[in-house]
Image (tube, helix red, strand yellow):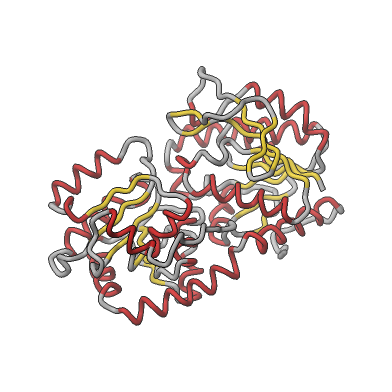
Amino acid sequence: MRILVITPYYYPALIYGGPSFSVYYLVQGLAEAGAQVKVLTTNANGNRKLDIPLRERVLVGGVPTEYHPLSPFFTKRYFYSHSLKKSIVSQIHNFDLVHIQGTFVYPTLIAAKESWLAGKPFIITPRGAWDPWSLRQKRLKKKLYFEVFERRWINRAVAIHYTTEAEKRLANRLGLKVPGFVVPNPVFLEPLESEDAPLKFRKYWGIPENAPVILFLGRIHPKKGVGLLFSAFADLRRSLPEAWLIIAGPDGEGFTNHYKKLAASLGVSDHIVWTGLVSGSEKTACYYAADIFVLPSHQENFGMAVAEAMLCELPVLISPGVNLANFVLKYGAGEVIPLNNRLWTIKIIEWLKNDERRKSAGKYGNKAAKKAFSIDSVARQMVNIYLKILKGEKLDDNFRH
């Protein structure tokens, strides 16, 4: 089974957060499951470009990958690459199925068109782009682009891959004529370098050993509810002056300075640690160094950091806009809290003051996440779907892998 994965950006373009990891882990899992996989992508990495060989085959995690240069004449968020188009056209006939990542971007448009012209079945993973919150951002521009350019090609896909039931349900309003299926993102974390790595992490950042610690890990962006979190943190420190907040993640479009000024105006700068992007075993230590994980996001297609926190036995406090909310509630891995400053203040204090509740939620979340999000489990589900498609079996919205 030969699978071509086409994505606008790819590992190690970590500036884009969760999708960079989830697509990479999926590709790794597919290869380990016996599929012949190749990735075609661009050298995009936010305001910078990846320092990586272009227009040639390189091995990324053992999987053949080609990175192509972005055009300087288009907005970088459109991921236009004429070189990528040429590569797709020349190689698409060598594959049995094409799996396309993302929407509202050039690689998806050209990949869907060329797949159809070559008679190759293709799947599209929207990665949360069709969530109502996302669609409201630059609403008219997206609506025009979708109706004029994308809809007709998306309707020619054999299936749409959603990563949560919530994402699938929210996409129904688009009225697409394509069946959808749900397979979660695979999640993986490097092991701790040593048992005392979390304590070393705290010491490095100047956090007292016994201080209650709240962790936010993700892009620094208004979508993530960072402003609400800072307001809640300022309020809760009246009851818990010893509390600390870790902000771990890359700068999302230059918002870090804005939030640092907000923290200063709220008088909490001295108890907030800004680690920047963390990865590998350092990221794992960051999770284990905390007492609770928080994500008051307006919208999360999946929430890779939520799943990672659960793997680290960390209770998760998230908003209803995080599409793993039902999963968290079902398995008792934390709490889902509406986007209200006062409510978040109260709930964070409650969780920080209840050791047994944190311990129980952490264990429940860990057990559920290991079963649901392992690379092996997710890859096997996806391979089974690929096989059904290649055998000519039609999928419908009631399909279950």
Q: Nearer the viewer, residue 117 or 197?
A: 197
Marker count (numbered): 0
Give the x, y percent position of residue 311.
Answer: 49, 66
The answer to whether residue 149 is visible is no
In this rendering, position of residue 127 left or right of residue 395: left
In this rendering, position of residue 249 left or right of residue 142: left
The answer to whether residue 210 is visible is yes
Give the x, y percent position of residue 285.
Answer: 40, 60
| Residue positioned most to the right | 391
In this rendering, position of residue 234 left or right of residue 304: left
179 shown above or below 220: below
336 shown above or below 255: below
Image quadrant occupied by the C terminus:
bottom right
Residue at 55%, 32% in the rendered image: 145
Q: Nearer the viewer, residue 201 or 376?
A: 201
Q: Nearer the viewer, residue 100 or 245?
A: 245
Residue at 51%, 69% in the rendered image: 327
Residue at 64%, 32% in the rendered image: 109
| Residue positioned most to the top | 73
Give the x, y percent position of residue 342.
Answer: 22, 64
In this rendering, position of residue 1 left or right of residue 341: right
Q: Nearer the viewer, residue 325 or 192?
A: 192
219 shown above or below 232: above
Q: Quadrant of residue 168?
A: bottom right
Q: Quadrant of residue 70?
A: top right
Give the x, y percent position of residue 12.
Answer: 53, 40
